[in-house]
Amino acid sequence: MKRNNDKLDQVRAVDILLVEDNPGDVRLTKEALKDAKVLNTVYVAKDGVEAMQFLHREDSHSTVPLPDLILLDLNLPRKDGREVLAEIKKRHHIKTHSSNCFDNF
């Protein structure tokens, strides 16, 4: 089967912001994305405050792109995921089309 190289040239990595404070969960998420063969760039924020700095492009995040996908842990230090989600919904430049939350019980 011959592939259409034009389509391959148009493919770009999905920019993902992973907001997770557990290094083990970060590692597992990256492995899952790799195993699924998802072309991606993963940026990691360790808490809700850092996530908002990333989304507002503050401090060391001044040159990062806005993510195509945000994977958000709800139980975070400093600012929890629910607060982050509420702030994202208020901001027009980072507002999402839909929001889904998944959490471990």
Image (cartoon, grey):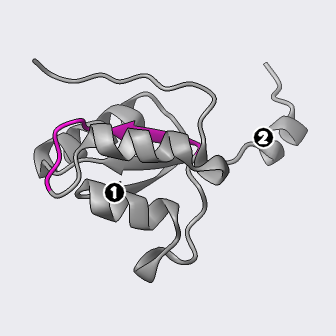
Q: Amino acid at mark 2?
A: Leu
In the picture as drawn, the residue positioned furthest to the bottom comes out as 59
In the image, is residue 69 part of the stretch drawn in magenta? yes
At x 45% / y 41%, what residue is drawn? 70
Q: Which mark is residue 44?
A: 1
Task: Please name whichever residue, 30 or 1, is drawn nearer the observer in this view of the structure.
Answer: 30
What is the span of residues highlighted in magenta in the rendered image? 68-77
At x 60% / y 42%, what residue is drawn? 95
At x 89% / y 40%, what residue is drawn? 6
In the image, is residue 44 part of the stretch drawn in magenta? no
Q: Residue under circle 2?
A: 8
Task: Please name whichever residue, 74 or 35, is drawn nearer the observer in this view of the structure.
Answer: 74
Residue 97's image quarter?
top right
Residue 2's image quarter?
top right
x%, y% of residue 62? 54, 78
Q: Is residue 9 left or right of residue 38?
A: right
Q: Tell me the CA gap for discs 1 and 2.
A: 27 Å
Q: Is residue 105 left or right of residue 62?
A: left
Pair 1/2: label in front: 1
Quadrant housing the C terminus: top left
Identify the element where label 2 is drawn. helix
Q: Residues within 10 Å of mark 2 (few under 14, many from 20)?
A: few
x%, y% of residue 52? 40, 60
Q: Amino acid at mark 1?
A: Val
Can I make out residue 33 in this image? yes
Of the numbered discs 1 and 2, the one sitting upstream in the chain is 2
